[in-house]
Image: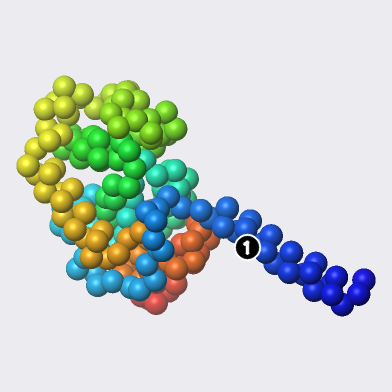
Amino acid sequence: MNRRALVLTISAVIIAGFVAAAMLYQRSSAPQEVPTVTQSTGSLVRFHSPTLGPINAPVTIVEFFDPSCESCRAFYPYVKQIMAKYPNDVRLVIRYVLFHQGSEEAVRLLETARLQGLYEPVLAAVLEAQPLWHDDATAQKAWEAAAAAGLDIEKARATMNSQAINEILAKDADDVKKVGIRGTPTFYVNGKLLTEFGPGPLLELVESELENGR
């Protein structure tokens, strides 16, 4: 093989690698780049945010999360695995991002589930059913999944447009702009942005923060 042919072959392999990586880690996003700067904790964690795990955990994962986002659905089991591995040391704070059709309806549904003490089972059910509803502005299949998980639908419908839930959505939308979120899921661990997208890098950052806290 002559020198020119070798260079062309190597270049083709490199380009193919970049394309494959992009396809593997493609995220649901608005038409801008993902932020690359760490933001202050003040815009990351709010008192109203859903929190899973011990409140005094030394490591806090903040996930900017869109329930209609397919990548958020794919990541959910990995986040749960991390929390199961470190049940006393890791908490998850969820911040809402409304990039998709059906996102607001699903978030309002989730917040009514929180009022009924059913946030985690309804979240899991809504994500499992996501392929059936994520292009539906009414998120009808999400409601059906929530009902199967125990949600009182009549009570939920009556509270989903409350002022309290309106304020949660408005505050999260404001923080999404302040932080500069352009894709979901976007993770921060103890205020540090996860810059390498993937379950492995997320676990590594969590374990690094755990080690630093010892």
Instruction: Compare residues 21 and 42 and report the one nearer the observer.
Output: 21
Q: Quadrant of residue 183?
A: bottom left
**Image vertical order of residue 115 relative to residue 57, above or below:** above
Question: Residue 91: percent from the left, percent from the top?
Answer: 31, 57
Task: Tell me if I can see residue 71 in this picture.
Answer: yes
Its colouring scheme is: rainbow
Q: Residue at x 38, y 33 (%)?
A: 135
Q: Residue 11 appears at what percent x and percent y?
A: 73, 69
Q: Nearer the viewer, residue 9 or 186?
A: 9
| Residue at the outermost left position | 163
Residue 188 vs residue 164: left or right?
right
Q: Quadrant of the C terminus?
A: bottom left
Task: Classify mark 1: residues with Cα within 10 Å, few (<14), some (14-19) or many (20+).
Answer: few
Q: Callout 1: helix, strand or loop?
A: helix
Observer able to see residue 117: no
Q: Is residue 173 left or right of residue 204?
A: left
> How many marks do you count on the picture?
1
Residue ID at (16%, 55%): 171
- Residue at 34% x, 30% y is 136
Residue at the outermost right position: 1
6 lies left or right of 96: right
**Amino acid type, label 1:** Phe
The residue carrying mark 1 is 18
Q: Position of residue 93 (x, y in %)?
A: 28, 55
Against 50, residue 209 (above or below) is below
Where residue 44 appears, as percent x and y from the top left, is: 25, 63
Quarter of image, res 9: bottom right
From the image, which quarter does the N terminus lie in? bottom right
Q: Nearer the viewer, residue 160 or 54?
A: 160
- Residue drawn at x 13%, y 43% is 165
